[in-house]
Each structure stands twice: as structure tokens, then as C-alpha cells.
Image: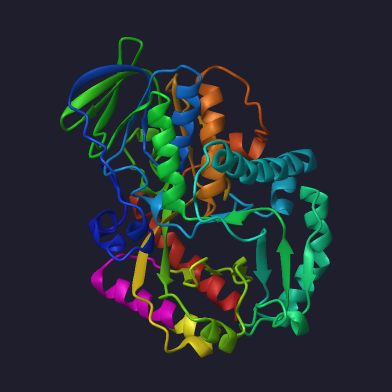
Amino acid sequence: MKHIWEPAAYGPEPIRDCWWADTVTPGDWPALEGDTTTDVAIVGAGFTGLSAALHLAEAGINVTVLDAQHPFWGASGRNGGFNCLGGAKASHDEIAKKFGKSEMYEYAKAERAAVETVGHLVDRLDLDVDRHSDGETMLAHRPKDFEHMRKRAGHIKELYGVEPTVIPPEELTQAGLNGGFHGAVTNPLGFALNPRKYARGLAHAARDAGAAIHGHSAVTSIEPDQGGYRLHTASGSVRAKKFIIATNGYSSDNLPPWMAARYLPTQSSVIVTRPMTQEELTAQGWTSYQMCFDSRHLLHYFRLMPDNRMLFGMRGGLSHTENTEAAIKKKIRADFDAMFPAWRHVETPHYWSGFVCISRDLLPYAGPIPGMEGGFAAFAYHGNGVSMGSYSGTILADLVQGKTPATPYPAPMRHTPRRFPLGRFRRLLMRPAYLQYALHDL
């Protein structure tokens, strides 16, 4: 495999103390042994791959899923658990400029449909995912950000057809959102969940519907074979009429070669506290169970979970070594203490990191792989993989069957991602970008 980060980033160490891993065991997903044949092979058993597998299997399609580790080992099992609007880093204005206003509105419809897709799956499959939070709240870390947010609140109604709630600074404490912010806007769409419980539910549902799911079966090559493709692993192979790449930030530049430089993994890190008492919550003035993020470009995302643990995440890691991980762990705790000073004494026994995936155009992609008839891929959800990854899986399930997607499939998602410059050294592009973001956030 041609990964572009340090090998340690793809090993067990980043999720050694992951809180989600304490709540959900990996389960038994035996490796592929020997040669087999299927209709559709899926590489990657995260939200995208499992969603696609479930919908294909329910349609009577023979599906085989291959994962290098086990289902939900990658970003799907270590993210913040925010089922929210998003999927693109490009703004709606930028989307309108590039694709036209009608496609901007279509993309907004897709965002909402993505959030609703997760809700429908949770309800239909009767999954216990520790669901909480009525939508998502954006908090202003500067007064000027709140003024901008307040002016743009009407844009939320225009795009998504819902009424946002504007919370002025003087009402934040009453709302249970006291963290030194300067106002907030809540979009009522979305909810928080335990991502591993959700992914496990998708995996079990897909398997029950007839999908074969194999862990510890890293795909080493994909080659044409008898009008289809053969996917090789260390202990077997799968011959498939069609295949899907659903590895997102954990992709490889040579599986297939078309993927090279079309995605850029960037690190996100998370800490989780021990359960806090009601007195500790009251001391800080944070009693809300809303999922939240702040207005920084290098944003923080955080939420109080049902058992009164606080989850707190941030962007910023540009390499993965013992020293850089120690520095990020120290930085994230310092930011947590600055935002919630009454909790300086509260232990954070859980720390982990994983990859967010971006594209050069700052847009998600779900569609065919040019030059490989019957090959499809979906990736680059820009930190919103719970919703957009699940949704992209449903789109690919339709495309694989030769169907026009039944849900919004806008041009921004169909646009073939351009390659980043610098090839396997493209991570270097993040350093000046992060410096610019940090200066902008002052």
C-alpha cells in the first residue's frame, strides 16, 4: 500500500485509549480465505462501505466487503459522532460560483438528506446509538463572528427550510453553554451519536441481509479479470463484476492508481473526560447536551454526552510521531482548560487521533472511477463522514445497479476530484494553510 503518512498513523497506537472502543468490541470478522466470486466487492468497512453493502444486499445483490483491520476501525470508529450538515469545506457561495445557484441548492438538499439518511437508518434498524442533541450549535469565539453568524442565520432557512435559533451572548449561560463565547446559532438539523454503535449496527444489518464482511483482509491489488476485476488479499482473492473504494482518509495511492493524490488525509484528535458530577457541570455553567463547534477555521468540536463525559476534539496534527502526538495531546488539553476553566481538575483519560479526508476542490466525491468501468469510489467528507459517508454509500448502491440515485445527487458530488500537487509529498501543503488559518483565527 502507498500510504502518505507515517506508518504509526495506520497502526493500533492512535486508538489505544479511544473511548468508543471501550463501548463497542470489534466483533468477529474472519479474514478472507481462498478465492471467491461476488457481484460487488467493497474495499473499506466504514460508514460508506457498510451503507453501500446494506443497501445492495437488501436489493438482492451479492456483496463482499474487505477491510484491512475490522469494520469501523478507521475514521468511522474514532470520529466525534456528529451527524450534521456538511461534507464540503467549500462554502455555499463558492459552490454557487463554480456550479451555479441551482446546484448550490441541490447540494444543500443533499446535506439535509444525508443527515436524514442516518436518522432513518437508526430508526429502521432500531439501533441504540446513545442519540442526543437537537441539531448542532455553532459558537462564536469572537464578537465579530457572532455578528456574521447572526446576519447569516436567514441563509440557513433559505438553504435548508428550517428556522435557526440565535442565542445572544447574555443568554448563553441560561442555555447551559457557558464557555467564554460571544453568542451562538443553533441549526435544528442533526443529532449526536456513538459512532461505533452506529457502525456496528450497519455491519450487523448488512451481514444479516446477506453481505459477506471480512476483516484482516487488506486489498493488495486490483486487476482486470474476465470482464470484471479481481481483488487480491494476503490469503485469498475476490472476483467481482464491480467494485467500490470506500476507504476515505485511509486510502492508498495505488488502490487503484486513479486515487493517487486525489485525497489528502489530515489529522483530528479527541479527548474525553471522566463522567462529571452535576456540581462540576454547574460550576462551569455547561449543562447542555448539544453538539457544538466554534467559529475557528481550525475548529474545536465538543459535546456533553449522556453519561456526563465531555468530548472535545480539534484539528491541527501535521505528522504522526511520538513527539508530535505528545505535543497535540498537550495542546488539546490546554485548549480545553482555556475554554472550560472550571474543569481544569477533571481528568481526560481518553485521547485518540484519526484522519479527516479532504479533496483539492474541498468537495466530497461519490461516483464512477474514470477509465475503470464498473469501478466506483466515495471519499473526502471534510470531517462530516457520519452523514455524508452514509449518504454516499446509498448513492453508490444505486449507481452500481445502474440506477439514477433516488435522492439528491448534485454536481458538486459528481465533480471528478483534481489531483493535489506534490504527489506523495502533498502533506506539505497543509503547513502554510494551517499557519494562515491560525492567524485568521486570532
Q: Is residue 116 left or right of residue 4?
A: right
Instruction: Give the camera-side residue of 257 and 240.
Output: 240
Residue occupying image coordinates x 22% and y 24%: 237
Q: Is residue 398 left or right of residue 374?
A: right
From the image, give the main secondary structure of the stretch colored magenta. Answer: helix
Rendered location of residue 317, percent (x, y): 39, 67
On the rendered image, what quadrant is the C terminus found in?
Answer: bottom right
Up the image or down, 111 lies above or below 286; here it is above
Q: Quadrant of residue 206?
A: top left
Rendered location of residue 234, percent (x, y): 16, 33
Instruction: Give the camera-side residue of 29 and 228.
Output: 29
Residue occupying image coordinates x 62% and y 66%: 290
Rendered location of residue 337, percent (x, y): 48, 85
Instruction: Give the camera-side residue of 430 and 81.
Output: 81
Q: Quadrant of residue 409?
A: top right
| Residue 284 makes an appearance in the image | yes
User: Which range is magenta?
Assistant: 317-333
Give the residue furthest to the top.
226
Up the image or down, 189 lies above or below 351; here it is above
Up the image or down, 54 lies above or below 129; here it is above
